[in-house]
Image: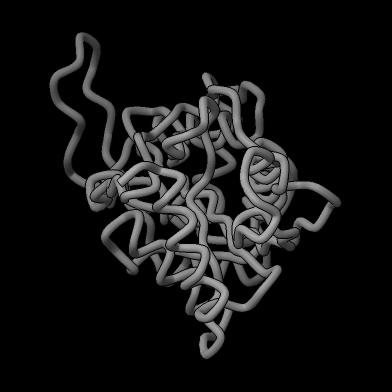
């Protein structure tokens, strides 16, 4: 079935099933091979990329809708999820469907609730549905053109990560269970958008007493194998409640 027919058929069902004018957009982050990535998709009739999203059923809580949308795209619901902003500017989404009839569900004005999610890369199963031609991870340092206002949503999510770095379990949810200090520093540098002094970072992060040094090291490199660490979750949660002190 051609894409226009698919959308028109879906439109009839959506008017009955979902709350009008309300949508959800998810910014799904993952940290893989020292690169912070975001999950993107491309609709079949669009040249630019977008963020995973969807609508809220008439008999559904908003947070439950976000969990459902996340599971549909990643194959898992065991992911850290945080509501972070509401996007409601005029004509923020209608322009993507200019060629369609005004009665199309997707062409209506939508106010979108933004959620960011922190996913373990290896636990995600990317799903290309009937509306999409691609679903891929993209490095936040090399992003393609985005549809609608999705680049604005992504930038706001990144800013929120930066602001919440000292009081939300961001590192815990993006890093694997065992990680090296350079990997942790690299994650902080990407989120903060700046280079950090190695010695100062190590001293500061160790002073928080939220890491456990393991009797293991990362094998396979050309240089001395770096030590492996993991978060002491109990101490980490206590520290986050108080807020990690000081700026980076």
Note whether residue 126 is visible.
Answer: yes
Work out which residue is located at the far top of the displayed protein and give it.
Answer: 222
Q: Vertical placement of 232 versus 96: above or below?
A: below
Which residue is located at x 70 percent, y 68 percent? 21
What is the image's colouring?
A: one colour
Q: Would residue 129 appear left or right of 159 to someone viewing this image?
A: left
Note whether residue 248 is visible.
Answer: no
Work out which residue is located at the far left of the displayed protein and give it.
Answer: 220
Q: Would residue 137 appear left or right of 216 to someone viewing this image?
A: right
Q: Would residue 3 appear left or right of 201 to someone viewing this image?
A: left
Q: Where residue 18 sits: x, y (%)?
A: 55, 77
Work out which residue is located at the far right of the displayed protein and give it.
Answer: 90
Which residue is located at x 54 percent, y 49 percent? 27
Q: Where residue 226 sits: x, y (%)?
A: 28, 27
Quadrant position of the C terminus in the picture = top right
Q: Where residue 196 sits: x, y (%)?
A: 61, 25
Pick the front one: 14 or 9: 9
Q: Tell how many labels.
A: 0
Q: Vertical placement of 159 versus 8: above or below?
A: above
Pick the front one: 197 or 53: 53
Examine the image and state in which quarter residue 148 appears.
top right
Examine the image and state in which quarter residue 97 appears.
top right
Q: Where residue 243 sits: x, y (%)?
A: 67, 62
Which residue is located at x 43 percent, y 41 percent? 39
């Amino acid at each position: 079935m051609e894409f226009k027919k698919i959308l028109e058929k879906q439109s009839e069902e959506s008017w009955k099933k979902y709350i009008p004018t309300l949508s959800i957009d998810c910014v799904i982050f993952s940290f893989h091979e020292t690169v912070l990535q975001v999950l993107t998709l491309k609709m079949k009739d669009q040249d630019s990329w977008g963020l995973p999203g969807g609508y809220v059923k008439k008999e559904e809580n908003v947070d439950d809708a976000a969990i459902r949308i996340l599971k549909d795209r990643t194959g898992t619901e065991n992911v850290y999820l945080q509501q972070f902003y509401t996007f409601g500017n005029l004509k923020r989404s209608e322009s993507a469907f200019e060629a369609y009839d005004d009665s199309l569900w997707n062409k209506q004005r939508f106010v979108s609730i933004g959620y960011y999610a922190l996913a373990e890369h290896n636990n995600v199963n990317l799903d290309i549905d009937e509306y999409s031609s691609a679903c891929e991870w993209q490095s936040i340092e090399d992003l393609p053109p985005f549809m609608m206002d999705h680049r604005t949503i992504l930038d706001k999510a990144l800013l929120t990560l930066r602001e919440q770095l000292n009081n939300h379990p961001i590192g815990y949810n993006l890093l694997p269970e065992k990680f090296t200090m350079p990997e942790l520093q690299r994650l902080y540098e990407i989120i903060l958008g700046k280079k950090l002094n190695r010695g100062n970072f190590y001293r500061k992060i160790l002073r928080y007493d939220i890491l456990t040094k393991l009797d293991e090291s990362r094998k396979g490199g050309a240089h001395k194998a770096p030590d492996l660490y993991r978060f002491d979750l109990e101490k980490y949660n206590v520290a986050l409640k108080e807020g990690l002190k000081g700026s980076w």
